[in-house]
Image: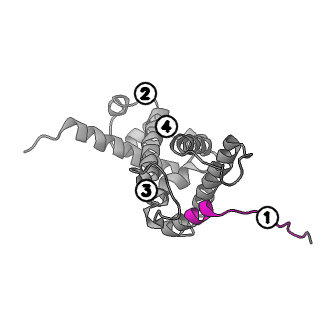
């Protein structure tokens, strides 16, 4: 009989706690979930929980952080070895950020409910930080008078809004469609905006 490596045991234990937490969050708000419920549903004792976490918030924070790390990995993949991203050349099927959200749709749907742990704000801040650290938007060819900081904010929060609305609409379009649309949107320039006529 082989002895399981401690790290694998720890990983399986934490995965069980996360799975249980998500299941409980489908029934009630995170605020109303107790450590006793988590432990009982996971079929562990309290000592096992406290060996890894001090409080339930630590469990959720660790889960969120791991998910954000996976999100970052998916975001970086298309341009990992590039110095400049040319949206005319990058294939749309290389944009796998939307695949990440689709693969983890249960997590994101639950976490983005209005009452859940300020997750909407956490995710927006993480994506904003990621985009600002990774990309430098250039506007000199278009209009050198544009404030690059404001332009970056406009672009970044447009992408974030696109992602959030897609999740909130229950992933109505495919991830490949969303990746394709994102590339077209980033390439698109709108010199005129037409005012909708009020009825």
> Which quadrant does the N terminus fall into?
top left
Q: In the rendering, which numbered label is found on residue 54?
A: 2
Marks 1 and 4, how far apart in space? Answer: 54 Å
Where, by quadrant of the figure, is residue 43 drawn? top left
Kindly identify which residue carries mark 1: 192
Q: Is residue 27 visible?
A: no
Secondary structure of the residue carrying numbered label 3: helix
Find residue 129 and report its horizontal and vertical position in percent. 56, 40
Kindly identify which residue carries mark 4: 34
Kindly identify which residue carries mark 3: 78
Where, by quadrant of the figure, is residue 7 drawn? top left
Q: Callout 3: few (<14), some (14-19), or many (20+) C-alpha neighbours within 10 Å?
A: some
Badge 4 or badge 3: first in the primary sequence:
4
What range is drawn magenta here? 182-197
Residue closest to the far left: 1
Marks 4 and 3, how far apart in space? Answer: 41 Å
> Which quadrant does the C terminus fall into?
bottom right
**Model colouring:** one colour
Secondary structure of the residue carrying numbered label 2: loop
């Amino acid at each position: 009989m082989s002895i399981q490596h401690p790290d694998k045991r720890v990983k399986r234990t934490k995965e069980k706690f996360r799975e249980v937490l998500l299941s409980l969050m489908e029934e009630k708000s995170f605020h109303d979930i107790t450590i006793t419920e988590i432990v009982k549903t996971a079929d562990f004792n309290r000592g096992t929980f406290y060996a890894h976490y001090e409080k339930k918030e630590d469990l959720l924070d660790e889960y969120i952080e791991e998910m954000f790390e996976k999100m970052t990995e998916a975001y970086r993949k298309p341009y990992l070895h590039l110095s400049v991203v040319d949206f005319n050349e990058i294939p749309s099927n290389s944009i796998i950020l939307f695949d990440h959200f689709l693969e983890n749709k249960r997590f994101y749907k639950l976490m983005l409910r209005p009452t859940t742990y300020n997750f909407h704000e956490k995710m927006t801040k993480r994506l904003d930080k990621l985009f600002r650290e990774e990309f430098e938007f250039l506007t000199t060819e278009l209009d050198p008078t544009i404030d690059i900081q404001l332009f970056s904010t406009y672009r970044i929060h447009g992408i974030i809004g696109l992602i959030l609305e897609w999740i909130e609409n229950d992933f109505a379009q495919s991830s490949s469609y969303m990746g394709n649309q994102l590339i077209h949107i980033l390439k698109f320039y709108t010199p005129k905006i037409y005012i909708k006529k009020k009825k």
